Image: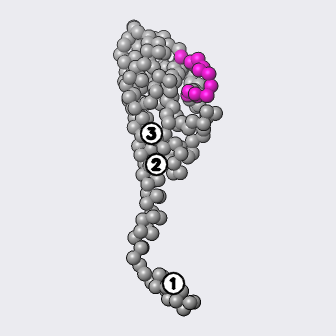
Amino acid sequence: MIWSLKQRLGWFRRADEGNATVEFVIVFPLMLLIMAYGVDLAFVNLRYAALERALDLTVRDIRLGTGTAPQHDEIKDLICVRASFIENCDENLRLEMINIDPRNWVDIDPNADCTDKSEEVSPVRTFVNGQENELMILRVCARNNPIFPDAALGLGKDLASDPDGEKQYSLVSTTAFVQEPQ
């Protein structure tokens, strides 16, 4: 009986019919996770590019529209219309417009003001329409959900959850412009 078992185990050790299957079973899940991470990262880049472009086009309209002072809601609507890849843009986008004196520079707060679904809606942090020839900083923060929030190698793995348990990443874009004279 022991001899028969040794013979069968020896044959099993020498056989090579299942090598490709074993390799596939080990490598395929890892490749699938890396692909999921790549798709997630591609969507982050796509959304960031859309946000940057929308902000640039909106600021261009502000600069060229001399004599007008668009308000917070108008600017937000323009950005949301142009940033088509930002999901729930009306709810997930926050704007800050800060007047900066270029001769007496003071850095702006490095932490962008982003939405937090777990908190009550807070008022606009800073939004001041500048006067003629004033330097203005416009910062936009959009929160988005990753495509695969719970994938082992995806972006969602490293994101902190808010109190509601939702994982989101922030896209922050900043630009500067000078209020043109009327």
Q: Which mark is residue 178?
A: none
Relative to 172, residue 182 above or below: above
- Highlighted magenta segment, given as a residue range: 114-127
Q: Quadrant of residue 162?
A: top right
Q: Are marks 1 and 2 in contact (CB under 8 Å)?
A: no
User: Looking at the image, which residue sits at the far front?
Assistant: 1
User: Is residue 21 depicted above or below 13 in this figure?
Assistant: above
Q: Residues within 10 Å of mark 2 (few under 14, many from 20)?
A: many
Quarter occupied by the C terminus: top left
What residue does disc 2 label? Answer: 37
Q: Which mark is residue 9?
A: 1
What's the residue at 36%, 13% (across, down)?
A: 65
Viewer can see residue 107: no
Kindly identify the amino acid type of the residue bearing the numbered disc 2. Answer: Tyr
> Residue 124 at what x, y percent from top left?
56, 18
x and y, in percent, of residue 21 in the image: 41, 68
Q: CA distance from mark 1 to mark 3?
A: 52 Å
Q: What residue sits 49% from the left and 20% below the top?
A: 136
Three-letter amino acid code at the position of disc 3: Val
Q: CA distance from mark 1 to mark 2?
A: 41 Å
Secondary structure of residue under mark 3: helix
Residue depicted at x 50% and y 88%:
7
Q: Magenta: predominant secondary structure element?
A: loop
Position of residue 67 in the picture relative to residue 139 (left or right): left
Q: Nearer the viewer, residue 30 or 75?
A: 30
- Provide residue 53's location: percent of width, then percent of height: 38, 29
Give residue 150's position: percent from left, percent from top. Answer: 53, 45
Q: Mark 1 or 2 closer to N-term?
A: 1
> Helix, strand or loop at disc 1?
helix
Q: Nearer the viewer, residue 76 or 5?
A: 5
Magenta span includes 124: yes
